[in-house]
Image (tube, rainbow, N blue to C red):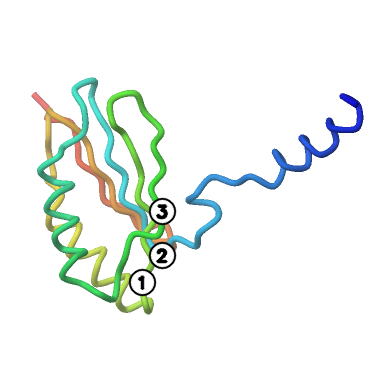
Amino acid sequence: MTLLCLPLLLAACASQRAPAEAAKCDLTVTFGSYAAGTDGKVEQEIAAYLRETPAVSIRSRTNWGREGEHTWCLGATSPKAARAAFQAIRAIIPAVSSQAWTEVKLADGETFRTDWPRP
Protein backbone atom coordinates (compact mmCIF):
# COMPACT_ATOMS: atom_id res chain seq x y z
CA MET A 1 0.00 0.00 0.00
CA THR A 2 2.79 2.44 0.91
CA LEU A 3 4.54 1.83 -2.40
CA LEU A 4 1.33 2.53 -4.30
CA CYS A 5 0.77 5.85 -2.52
CA LEU A 6 4.33 7.13 -2.89
CA PRO A 7 4.06 8.01 -6.63
CA LEU A 8 0.81 9.90 -5.97
CA LEU A 9 2.40 11.83 -3.12
CA LEU A 10 5.45 12.72 -5.22
CA ALA A 11 3.28 13.84 -8.13
CA ALA A 12 1.20 16.05 -5.85
CA CYS A 13 4.30 17.67 -4.36
CA ALA A 14 5.86 18.26 -7.78
CA SER A 15 2.78 20.13 -9.01
CA GLN A 16 2.73 22.55 -6.07
CA ARG A 17 4.11 26.04 -6.78
CA ALA A 18 4.60 29.09 -4.63
CA PRO A 19 1.81 31.67 -5.12
CA ALA A 20 4.18 34.19 -6.75
CA GLU A 21 5.24 31.53 -9.27
CA ALA A 22 1.70 30.37 -10.00
CA ALA A 23 0.42 33.87 -10.75
CA LYS A 24 2.00 36.20 -13.28
CA CYS A 25 3.32 39.18 -11.37
CA ASP A 26 3.40 42.46 -13.27
CA LEU A 27 5.14 43.87 -10.21
CA THR A 28 5.95 42.74 -6.70
CA VAL A 29 6.07 44.56 -3.39
CA THR A 30 8.23 42.98 -0.72
CA PHE A 31 8.01 43.94 2.94
CA GLY A 32 11.23 43.04 4.76
CA SER A 33 12.63 43.51 8.22
CA TYR A 34 15.84 44.48 10.00
CA ALA A 35 14.95 42.19 12.95
CA ALA A 36 12.12 44.48 14.11
CA GLY A 37 9.19 43.51 11.89
CA THR A 38 7.93 45.07 8.70
CA ASP A 39 6.83 48.68 8.23
CA GLY A 40 3.07 48.45 8.77
CA LYS A 41 2.51 52.13 8.01
CA VAL A 42 4.06 51.81 4.55
CA GLU A 43 2.04 48.63 3.91
CA GLN A 44 -1.19 50.42 4.89
CA GLU A 45 -0.38 53.33 2.56
CA ILE A 46 0.34 51.00 -0.36
CA ALA A 47 -2.85 49.02 0.37
CA ALA A 48 -4.84 52.28 0.36
CA TYR A 49 -3.33 53.19 -3.02
CA LEU A 50 -4.29 49.77 -4.39
CA ARG A 51 -7.87 50.11 -3.11
CA GLU A 52 -8.15 53.39 -5.05
CA THR A 53 -6.54 51.97 -8.22
CA PRO A 54 -8.72 49.35 -9.94
CA ALA A 55 -6.12 48.80 -12.70
CA VAL A 56 -3.79 47.10 -10.18
CA SER A 57 -4.63 44.38 -7.66
CA ILE A 58 -2.98 41.90 -5.31
CA ARG A 59 -2.96 38.46 -6.97
CA SER A 60 -1.21 36.62 -4.18
CA ARG A 61 0.67 37.03 -0.92
CA THR A 62 3.66 34.90 0.02
CA ASN A 63 4.78 34.87 3.66
CA TRP A 64 8.46 34.01 3.97
CA GLY A 65 9.89 35.43 7.20
CA ARG A 66 9.59 35.05 10.94
CA GLU A 67 8.84 38.71 11.59
CA GLY A 68 5.96 39.18 9.18
CA GLU A 69 8.07 39.48 6.04
CA HIS A 70 6.01 38.87 2.92
CA THR A 71 5.71 39.62 -0.78
CA TRP A 72 2.68 40.72 -2.75
CA CYS A 73 2.33 39.64 -6.37
CA LEU A 74 0.45 42.42 -8.17
CA GLY A 75 -1.39 42.21 -11.45
CA ALA A 76 -2.05 45.18 -13.73
CA THR A 77 -4.48 45.65 -16.60
CA SER A 78 -1.68 46.94 -18.87
CA PRO A 79 2.06 47.69 -18.92
CA LYS A 80 1.17 51.38 -18.59
CA ALA A 81 -0.85 50.64 -15.43
CA ALA A 82 2.04 48.59 -14.01
CA ARG A 83 4.49 51.44 -14.68
CA ALA A 84 2.15 53.97 -13.05
CA ALA A 85 1.74 51.72 -10.01
CA PHE A 86 5.52 51.27 -9.76
CA GLN A 87 6.00 55.06 -9.71
CA ALA A 88 3.19 55.61 -7.18
CA ILE A 89 4.39 52.85 -4.84
CA ARG A 90 7.98 54.04 -5.18
CA ALA A 91 6.82 57.47 -3.97
CA ILE A 92 5.26 55.86 -0.87
CA ILE A 93 8.32 53.78 0.08
CA PRO A 94 10.86 55.72 2.18
CA ALA A 95 14.33 56.03 0.66
CA VAL A 96 15.94 55.36 4.04
CA SER A 97 14.66 53.50 7.11
CA SER A 98 16.25 51.97 10.18
CA GLN A 99 13.00 50.11 10.99
CA ALA A 100 12.41 47.95 7.91
CA TRP A 101 12.96 47.77 4.18
CA THR A 102 10.36 47.73 1.45
CA GLU A 103 10.93 46.97 -2.23
CA VAL A 104 8.86 47.42 -5.39
CA LYS A 105 9.93 45.60 -8.54
CA LEU A 106 8.55 45.63 -12.08
CA ALA A 107 8.44 42.39 -14.07
CA ASP A 108 11.24 43.75 -16.29
CA GLY A 109 13.51 43.94 -13.23
CA GLU A 110 13.44 47.68 -12.46
CA THR A 111 13.59 47.90 -8.66
CA PHE A 112 13.43 50.46 -5.87
CA ARG A 113 14.28 49.46 -2.30
CA THR A 114 14.63 51.23 1.03
CA ASP A 115 18.25 51.71 2.14
CA TRP A 116 19.70 51.34 5.62
CA PRO A 117 20.77 54.74 7.05
CA ARG A 118 24.43 55.53 6.47
CA PRO A 119 26.44 57.21 9.22
Residue at point 41%, 65% (across, down): 26
How far across and down, in percent of the image, does residue 83 sit? 29, 71
Q: Report the residue marked by disc 3.
A: 60
Q: Is residue 64 left or right of residue 16?
A: left
Residue type at numbered disc 3: Ser
Whether the residues at callouts 1 and 2 have beta carbons within 8 Å, the answer is yes
Residue type at numbered disc 2: Asp
Name the secondary structure under disc 1: strand
Residue at point 10%, 43% (across, down): 41
- Foreground mark, 3 or 2, reads 3
Q: Nearer the viewer, residue 59 or 119?
A: 59
Disc number placed over residue 76 in the picture, else none: 1
How far across and down, in percent of the image, does residue 52 sit? 15, 70
Which mark sits nearer the N-terminus, 1 or 2? Answer: 2
- Is 44 drawn above or below residue 58 in the view shown? above
User: How packed is label 3: few (under 14 Cα within 10 Å), some, or many (20 or more)?
Assistant: some
Q: Report the residue marked by disc 2.
A: 26
Which mark sits nearer the N-terminus, 3 or 2? Answer: 2
Q: Nearer the viewer, residue 84 or 19?
A: 19
C-alpha gap between disc 1 and disc 2? 6 Å
User: How packed is label 2: few (under 14 Cα within 10 Å), some, or many (20 or more)?
Assistant: many
Q: Is residue 65 left or right of residue 115?
A: right
**Quarter containing the C terminus:** top left
- Is 9 drawn above or below residue 90 in the view shown? above
Q: Nearer the viewer, residue 105 or 64?
A: 64
- Foreground mark, 3 or 1, reads 3
